[in-house]
């Protein structure tokens, strides 16, 4: 059961139907996000290894 008053429900419906929120969105793709994060981590790891190698730490 909703705990909102009828006035609040009307305000929520107006907000949800506003042009800002009315657009369709693409589905969230978790594997793409994980792939991007993995790729950035690999690049940072390689960059840090190359910097350490160049300085003579490795």
Image (cartoon, helix red, strand yellow):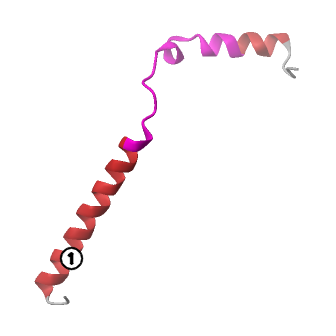
**Local crowd size for mark 1, using a 10 Å CA cut-off: few (<14), some (14–19), many (≥20):** some
Number of marks present in the image shown = 1
Query: 24 or 32: nearer the eye?
Result: 32
Q: Quadrant of the C terminus?
A: bottom left
Query: 20 or 1: nearer the eye?
Result: 1
Q: Is residue 54 above or below residue 47?
A: below
Give me the residue at 87% from left, 23% from top.
3
Q: Quadrant of the N terminus?
A: top right
Q: Position of residue 13 (x, y in %)?
A: 68, 11
The outermost residue toward the bottom is 57
Give me the residue at 78% from left, 16% from top.
8
Magenta part of the chain: 12-31
Q: Is residue 17 above or below residue 31?
A: above
Q: Is residue 30 magenta?
A: yes
Q: Position of residue 15 (x, y in %)?
A: 63, 15
Residue under numbered circle 1? 49
Q: Position of residue 5 (x, y in %)?
A: 86, 15
Give me the residue at 74% from left, 9% from top.
10
Give me the residue at 14% from left, 90% from top.
56
Q: Quadrant of residue 44?
A: bottom left
Q: Is residue 21 magenta?
A: yes
**Helix or strand or loop: what does disc 1 sit on?**
helix
Q: Is residue 15 left or right of residue 32?
A: right
The outermost residue toward the left is 54
Q: Is residue 44 left or right of residue 53?
A: right
Q: Is residue 57 left or right of residue 12?
A: left
Q: Is residue 18 left or right of residue 3?
A: left
Query: 6 or 37: nearer the eye?
Result: 37
The outermost residue toward the front is 31
Q: Position of residue 40 (x, y in %)?
A: 29, 57
């Amino acid at each position: 059961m909703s705990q909102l008053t009828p006035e609040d429900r009307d305000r929520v419906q107006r907000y949800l139907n506003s042009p800002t929120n009315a657009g369709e969105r693409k589905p969230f793709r978790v594997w793409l996000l994980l792939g991007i994060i993995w790729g950035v981590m690999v690049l940072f790891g390689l960059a840090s290894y190359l910097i350490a190698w160049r300085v003579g730490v490795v």
